[in-house]
Amino acid sequence: MSASRQYLIFLVLFAFMAPFFAFTVTTSHSEDVAASAIEKAEGVMVLAYQGVLEAERAGADVSRLLTRLNVASEYLARAHILYRVGGLDDATRFADLCFETAEKVKPEADRLRNTTLVESDMRLRFTMTESVVSVCLISVAGFLSWRVFKRRYHQRVLGMKPELVSDES
Amino acid sequence: MNLDDYRTLFAATTLGLVLIVALPTVSMVVSIPSGAERFSELWVLGPTRIAEGYPFNVRVGEQYRLFVGVGNHLGCSAYYVVYVKFRNQTQPLPDALNAVPSPLPPLYEFQAFVLDSETWEAPLSFTFLNVSRLENSSFVSELSINDVVFSVNCPSKWDLENSGFYYQLFFELWLYDTSLQRFQYHNRFVGIWLNMTS
């Protein structure tokens, strides 16, 4: 077989196989892109959730943040499902939507946590001052009223005259 | 009453008042742990969102509706995943004794963040799309859940005792563990039996 003929056969085979290779490479690339987008979205979701938990522990009302995270979680669940059934482009799209929604939650949760901590600190200081002042006032008032009472008690006791009782027996 | 009795009465009254006014501050500084039990709930409701009318005898091409719900009593917000799985009578269920999930792959999934003492519910509709029948066995190839089509390839033998081809659609509850930084099976599952009639 001449070299030119071998070259021709190789060329024809390549022409037939090229679409298959191209499809495999594209699918593999789409799969990588989707997996990476999902992983990125999962990371952001976890960070946002941790931020929300910290804000909640600080005493903040996190219901509004959780509503937004629930929207993001629906996107992420959709991305997982589509990835499983091979809808890689849609999976990537939903993972990106999840990322966009969740990435705004973490800074807001941090802000909410800091605000709540400052507010609760102020509230604690105010309540503590109020309690200390009240305790002092009550103690002083108790002591003074006790002294007044004691004086009146003594006056009353001292003001009493002994009663003479005739012993007729 | 003599003077000593009066002194005791004054001291006790003053101390009582001091404790009352100090109570708000003490309650802000000292947190008393709640003795309440921590747990999560998982449930499935029928098409009218009550615990009845569950689909049982199912046909190909007909749509059936359910509601799946989660209740959070963990004392803080929780991040849940509910995996929807499909099995025949011989395939494994989760192992409740060892808190191990079913090894079957999930088809559909729900994710939800639930506040403490709150609940979450979502609708789920499913349709059998491709089922073949050969003598005493049935084979489900495709199942659609919330308009997403899944290849399930699940065979079932005729159950002589209960007269039917039985499948189960079941739901597993997973919880995000912040210390492990991953989802963990929360040892809760619930499912409904389905008899493939035609």
Image (tube, coloured by chain):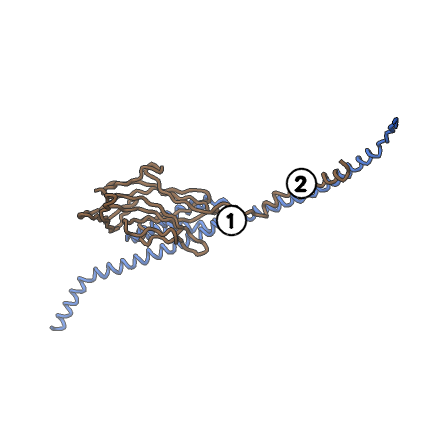
Chain colours: A blue, B brown
Q: Residue A57 carries which label?
A: 1
For disc 2, the neighbor class at 10 Å (few under 14, some 14 to 19, many from 20) is few
Discs 2, 1: same chain: no
Please state which of residues B164 and A46 is positioned toward the viewer in this rendering. Answer: B164
Hey, what amino acid is under mark 2?
A: Gly
Secondary structure, mark 2, is helix
Q: Which mark is residue B16?
A: 2
- Quick check: A151 above or below A53? above
Question: From this viewpoint, which residue is outermost toward the top?
Answer: A168
Q: Tell me if I can see residue A130 in this picture.
A: no
Q: Which part of the image, by quadrant, shows the C terminus of chain A?
A: top right
Q: Tell me if I can see residue B181 in this picture.
A: yes
Secondary structure, mark 1, is helix
Please state which of residues A164 and A70 is positioned toward the viewer in this rendering. Answer: A164
Spatial separation of the CA atoms under disc 2 and disc 1: 32 Å
Q: Mark 1 lies on which chain?
A: A
Left or right: B97, with A137 as reference point = left
Q: Which part of the image, by quadrant, shows the N terminus of chain A?
A: bottom left
Hey, what amino acid is under mark 1?
A: Arg
